[in-house]
Image (tube, rainbow, N blue to C red):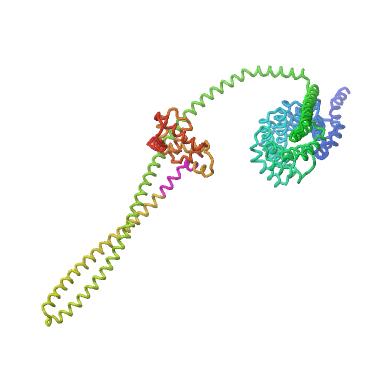
Amino acid sequence: MMKRLFYILCSLPLIIGCNEHSIKDELDIYEKDLEMNPKATYEILLNQEPVTQEDRARLALLTIKAKNLAYVPLEGKDTIDVLNAIDYYLQQRDEEQVMMGYYLLGSIYRDLGDAPRGVEAFRKVIEEADTNRVDCNYRLMARADAQKSDLFGLQNARPKAIESSKQAEYYSWKARDTSYAFDNAFGIIGLQCLDQNFEPLFMKAPRLVQACLEYGDTMMVVKWANTFAWFYLLKGMTDDAHKMIELYDRYDGRPYPIYYGTKGEFYLARHQLDSAEWCFRKELEATDWNNRQTAYRGLKKVFERRHLTDSALWYATLQCDAVDSDYDHKVSDAIIQMEHVYNYDAAKEKAQQSEMARQRTKLTLWMVVSVFIIVALLTGFGFKNYRNLQQRRLLEQKAEEEKLKTLLAEREKQLAQEESRRKTAESKAAQMEANLTEINADLEMQKRERGTLQQEIRVLKSSAESENAVTQKRIQELERQLQRKNQDITEAEREMELRKEELKTLQEEMASMKATIEELRKDAQQLENLGDGVQLMKRRLSKNKHATIDDWSALQTQIFKLHPTFIPSLQQLVNPLVERDLHLAMLIKAGFLPSEIAILMCLSASAVTMARRRLYQKAFDRSPKVPEEVDKWIMEVGE
């Protein structure tokens, strides 16, 4: 009997636990309605009674999330429920819920005005994320980084705020949340303008606005239109500001106080004082202290331009009072909030425990640092050997490139000689062809004369018996002329054959020269492709831009390839050889004109002339007589 009673008592908790009813299904339903109607969901969640530990953790996160979405101020007591939920989900290794818990914890610290703890909580959201997972919650990571940016902005740490906004934009694109990505991109430009960096506003903002409009998110553009208009007005760009105001009017047109203030500044820049005064007075109707400050400041400017000194002084006084009241209001609110935030005794005890933990790990840290130093030394020695090996390889490569340069110069010289010979041969062949034509014509004429003489001789011989002695003498004379003509014709025919053979030889030489020239041109084209440094400089000149660090490095590499002793010889002559002198000498060595050197080195023409004179004076302790003397000296260095 006692044994049976013992078994019943032991099984009673199990029976009771089986009868407990989890509210998991109800929480699933509330979570679906949370985004659509957060305020009503928050009121329902307040009346829920969790049973299991899982229900308590999930109900705590959903309640704080609904409270945050409903814009109900979060309180210090909410941190207890969120921290308990985080501890539970850390034990369960539920990454998604842990990220949400830290995000809500950061939101609580944000509403309490504790920016450092808020930043730390939002940072843990990013740390807990597993980006290797396909379903990683990049959307929540983007929100966390955006909240960090806002908190950094409240602390006037704008560089950190810009960095966090860039990360938020990156995570938004990863999550395919284009609207939030554009919002962060616009916010980055606004922070940069507050940091007095207006270049992104001029260069990036118009393209970003156009891209956002193409995505169809016009309300996001409208949201930032007034802000960009205000920054444009600060830089005196009234036309661009007017475009932003027109964009706002076209897609929204709701008269917010900031809209009246921006438009008042626009009218003020256009010297439309009556319209500006009306806008500033409309801005005064808002209850926000910041808007009252800007409205008073605008009215002060209006009356200053109207030369109404008393009214301007009156609004200047009201502006000062508004600034002081705003400061007192914020400080008092911060003090009230911080008095209800933490249990400072518990925080102090936790700090002491952390200090003890740091003392315990100090020895381990020193051991790790020692090991790291030893490893770093070994790595340094290995890196030094590797650098020496790389330098040897570089010297070998430079020697090979020098051979290529020498071969290129020889081929270019040979090409020029062959071109000259070809032109001479072509001229000579043309002259010989003209002479040959003349010889052929003369030969034909001689043949015709010979025929005439032969015919005349035959006639005279037939009548020789009846002719007198004078006729015989004439015949003898004509025979001698005929003999001379035969000799002339024979010599002309021999000379024509010789000229034909010489012309054939010249034609063969011209064909060989053309093949040689084509090969030399191909070799020269291949060798010219090695001149990357000069080509980069010429591209910069075509764009009218100065050279970058990479361009100087490429040019120095090419100069070292073509003239390996140039830079060492120049260093011996010019001491000290600063970077600007080296750049000037390399450009002169590469054959650039002074006007091109001025563009590449971002100098004026007179500054280039002075730099060349100083370089020559460092080497010879005297000024050059003419500027060309510097170029001649640079060309001879290292040759």
Q: Is residue 85 visible?
A: no
User: Residue 379 colored magenta?
Assistant: no
Quadrant of the rendering where the N terminus is positioned: top right
Give the camera-side residue of 338 and 618.
618
Q: Quadrant location of residue 165?
A: top right
- Quick check: 576 above or below 510? above
- Quick check: 592 above or below 466? above
Left or right of 76 in this view: 593:
left
Task: Give the residue displayed 59% in from the left and 19% down from the top.
Answer: 366
**In the image as oriented, which residue stretches furthest toward the right?**
1
Q: Quadrant location of residue 36?
A: top right
Task: Give the residue displayed 17% in from the left and 70% down from the top.
Answer: 483
Left or right of 195 in this view: 16:
right
Left or right of 56 in this view: 610:
left
User: Residue 525 colored magenta?
Assistant: yes
Give the camera-side residue of 602 and 180.
602
Quadrant of the rendering where the C terminus is positioned: top left
Q: Position of residue 171 (x, y in %)?
A: 68, 37
Q: So how many labels did they put on this image?
A: 0
Q: Position of residue 288 (x, y in %)?
A: 80, 32
Q: Which residues are magenta?
A: 522-536
Q: Is residue 156 visible?
A: yes
Q: Position of residue 616 (x, y in %)?
A: 42, 32
- Quick check: 437 above or below 599? below
Give the camera-side residue of 597 and 274.
274
Q: Main secondary structure of the magenta part?
A: helix
Q: Position of residue 216 (x, y in %)?
A: 72, 46
- Quick check: 376 above or below 35? above
Q: Quadrant location of residue 304?
A: top right
Give the camera-side residue of 266 and 94.
266
